[in-house]
């Protein structure tokens, strides 16, 4: 159950192409590939948007599909709200995970779930485009073609490698797609839409954080 909650947060992207992972690059090199619009929106106080997620499991003929919205709050974490097909909310804040579903709430800490701290840093760093932070946990790869850019991640440490083996971020003016392959070979693809940078965190979102 706890592993399932953790993997439910690894919500996104198609299988990474092999050519994205030839030689690791430094964070500064990767940042230069990303559009100025993406960098600007990542530096705001908050970022909101909607998502469509597909999770491809080896034992199922069709992917599991869900959709919803999210709020990233700088310095606080990420709220990931699933609206369809069921209602659930996951809050990553620091080294803790809060899962709210059906009127119940479950809290996990880094001591109960190995790798949780690294996963929490991953999600916060993705939306903040904090490549220096990502570089502590991942080898970074990247490429750019015209206005489109891609970033690849491979975990440096065994604790995180059990949860994911590689990830890919794709975008143009904004981050549009994330693909994560987990330690069992299952793949999660997430399409991000309607991204909006905010100067301040909405009060209703602030109340959802611990």
Image (cartoon, grey):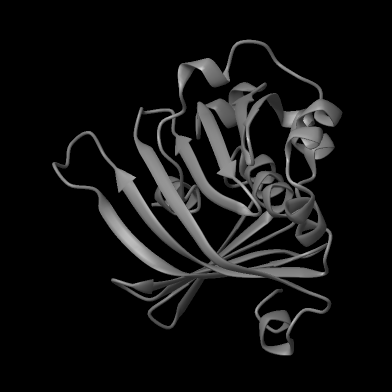
Q: Residue furthest left?
A: 61
Instruction: Say which residue appears at 41% left-offset and 46% top-offset.
Output: 189
Query: Vertical placement of 140 versus 120: above or below?
Result: above
**Residue 128 appears left or right of 86:** right
Instruction: Say which residue appears at 50% left-offset and 53% top-offset.
Output: 9
User: Where is residue 199 shown, x and y percent of the image?
Assistant: 83, 76
How many numbered marks have been drawn onto this rendered protein structure? 0
User: Where is residue 190 shown, x and y percent of the image?
Assistant: 45, 51
Query: Vertical placement of 71 versus 169: above or below?
Result: below
Question: Image quadrant of residue 151?
Answer: top right
- Residue nearest the viewer, comparing 13 with 115: 13
Question: Image quadrant of residue 76?
Answer: bottom right
Question: Image quadrant of residue 174?
Answer: bottom right
Q: Residue furthest bottom?
A: 203
User: Where is residue 7 shown, x and y percent of the image?
Assistant: 45, 46
Q: Residue furthest front?
A: 146
Instruction: Say which residue appears at 46% left-offset and 23% top-offset.
Output: 17
User: Where is residue 171 shown, x and y percent of the image?
Assistant: 59, 46
Query: Vertical placement of 115 versus 65: above or below?
Result: above
Quadrant of the snapshot with the C terminus: bottom right
Instruction: Say which residue appears at 70% left-offset and 25% top-offset.
Output: 140
**Residue 105 appears left or right of 85:** right
- Residue nearest the viewer, comparing 172 with 79: 172
**Residue 72 appears left or right of 29:** left
């Amino acid at each position: 159950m706890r592993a399932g909650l953790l993997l439910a947060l690894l919500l996104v992207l198609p299988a990474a192409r092999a050519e994205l992972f030839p030689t690791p690059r430094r964070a500064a090199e990767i940042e230069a590939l990303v559009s100025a619009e993406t960098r600007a929106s990542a530096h705001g106080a908050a970022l909101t948007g909607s998502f469509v997620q597909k999770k491809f499991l080896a034992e199922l003929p069709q992917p599991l599909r869900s959709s919803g919205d999210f709020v990233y709050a700088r310095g606080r974490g990420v709220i990931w709200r699933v609206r369809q097909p069921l209602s659930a909310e996951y809050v990553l804040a620091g080294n803790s995970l809060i899962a709210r579903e059906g009127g119940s709430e479950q809290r996990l800490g880094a001591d109960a779930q190995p790798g949780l701290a690294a996963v929490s840093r991953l999600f916060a760093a993705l939306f903040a485009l904090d490549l220096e932070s990502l570089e502590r946990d991942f080898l970074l790869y990247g490429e750019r073609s015209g206005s489109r850019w891609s970033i690849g991640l491979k975990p440096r440490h065994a604790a995180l490698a059990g949860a994911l083996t590689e990830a890919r971020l794709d975008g143009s003016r904004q981050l549009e797609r994330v693909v994560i392959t987990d330690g069992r070979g299952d793949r999660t693809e997430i399409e991000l839409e309607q991204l909006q940078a905010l100067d301040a965190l909405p009060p209703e979102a602030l109340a959802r954080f611990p």
